[in-house]
Amino acid sequence: MTGKKRILSGMRPTGPLHLGNLHGALLNWVRMQDEYDCFYFIADWHALTSDYENTSMISEYTREMIIDWLSAGLSPDKSTMFIQSHVKEHAELFLILSMITPVPWLERNPTYKDQIVQLSSKDLSTFGFLGYPVLQAADIIMYKPSGVPVGIDQVPHVEITREIARRFNFLYGEVFPEPEAILTKTPKILGLDRRKMSKSYNNAIFLSDKPDVISSKVSAMVTDPQRARKSDPGDPDVCNVFEFHRIYSGEATCDDINPKCRKAEIGCVECKKIMAKNLSKALEPIREKREYYEARPQTVDDIIADGIKRAGKVAAKTMEEVRASVKI
Ligand code: TRP
Ligand code: SF4
């Protein structure tokens, strides 16, 4: 592990992972395993910030998410995978950082303002929700990573993290390097109804979906809206099914279907069947690994315990430095 730059990222345990998560984040994480010393964790305390009223699923989702990670190719030999709430140092660093973080930095956080509007059914006027980025800053700088692979929506949080790190260093001495957000270009994948793929929109294909579930979801997908009948020519460029073909079916199939669709020589039903089959096949190795881990709960427990131990060692060392710097 020596010599490699460190990266860290996390996900909130909000439910089973879908293709949007796979292509948008997880496959990147997998690819980065060889080049970096990777720390990946489940942000279960962050899940509490918005779901404090109903906490019944958090621990189950946490475990399922780790199984999704392992199934998609994160390897315990290469990456440290852990659960935030099991490394208590995060809470201590959060507390200390909260002493030095000006409230206006949090109030003007675009994610904060946005979420309050988006999740209007929940009462998010809490101290914990406002402090979300402070906890995230603690998660990150604890491990002194050089980079944080995240989606564009998380960039403001990494920016606040850098500001908090800078302020800590200014007040107490250089302890924390300022991490960079690592943004990677990812294929855009929309939900079954062409909105953003999301569990809450009910338009997602999950990594854990079985082939029959995939078939029935794909058969309900929206295609070229102008194509009402099989005899109408279609336009693959505006068809979401074709976007999936581009990712899962390979060039030869795309080159075959494209003109046929335009000349109404292939119907959407058949086209979807081909796509569903290719998608199922692409997800097969993930499904197989999931079966492997589901049959071996002890192995999963051991991987989690080992990750927590490894993360805990780094966190304990950082906190010694922090306490010494703050003189407390
Ligand atoms: N806020 C992140 C999200 O919703 C999750 C998260 C919490 C995180 N702590 C983190 C991501 C630290 C990266 C680094 O996706
Ligand atoms: Fe889309 Fe395929 Fe139908 Fe063409 S044939 S509109 S690409 S589903």
Image (cartoon, grey):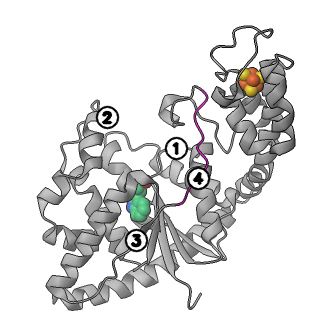
Split into 4 quadrants, where in the image is the C terminus? bottom left
Residue 248 is tagged as none
Ligand 2, seen in the image, is in the quarter at top right
- Whether tag 2 and tag 4 are in contact, CB under 8 A, the answer is no
Return the disc, 3 or 1, that comes first in the chain's sequence: 1
The residue singled out by tag 2 in the image is 118
3D distance between C-alphas at marks 2 and 4: 25 Å
Q: Residues within 10 Å of mark 2 (few under 14, many from 20)?
A: few
Residue of label 3: 180
| In this rendering, position of residue 292 left or right of residue 136 | right
* CA distance separating discs 2 and 3: 27 Å
The segment highlighted magenta reads 184-192
CA gap, disc 2 and disc 1: 18 Å
Residue count near mark 4 (Cα–Cα under 10 Å), binned few <14, some 14–19, many ≥20: some
- Give the Cα separation between the discs numbered 1 and 4: 21 Å
| Kind of residue sitting beneath label 1 | Gly
The numbered dot on residue 15 is 1
Instruction: Using the image, determine if residue 117 lies above or below residue 317.
Output: above
Query: Which SS class for mark 2?
Result: helix
Q: CA distance from mark 4 to mark 3?
A: 18 Å
Q: Main secondary structure of the magenta part?
A: loop
Res 306 seen here: yes
| Amino acid, disc 2 | Gln
Q: Is residue 102 magenta?
A: no
Q: Earlier in the sequence, mark 2 or mark 1?
A: 1
| Camera-nearest residue between 275 and 102 | 275
Secondary structure state at the residue bearing disc 4: loop
The residue carrying mark 4 is 186
Earlier along the polypeptide chain: callout 2 or callout 4? 2
Which residue is found at the position 39% from the left and 51% from the top? 153
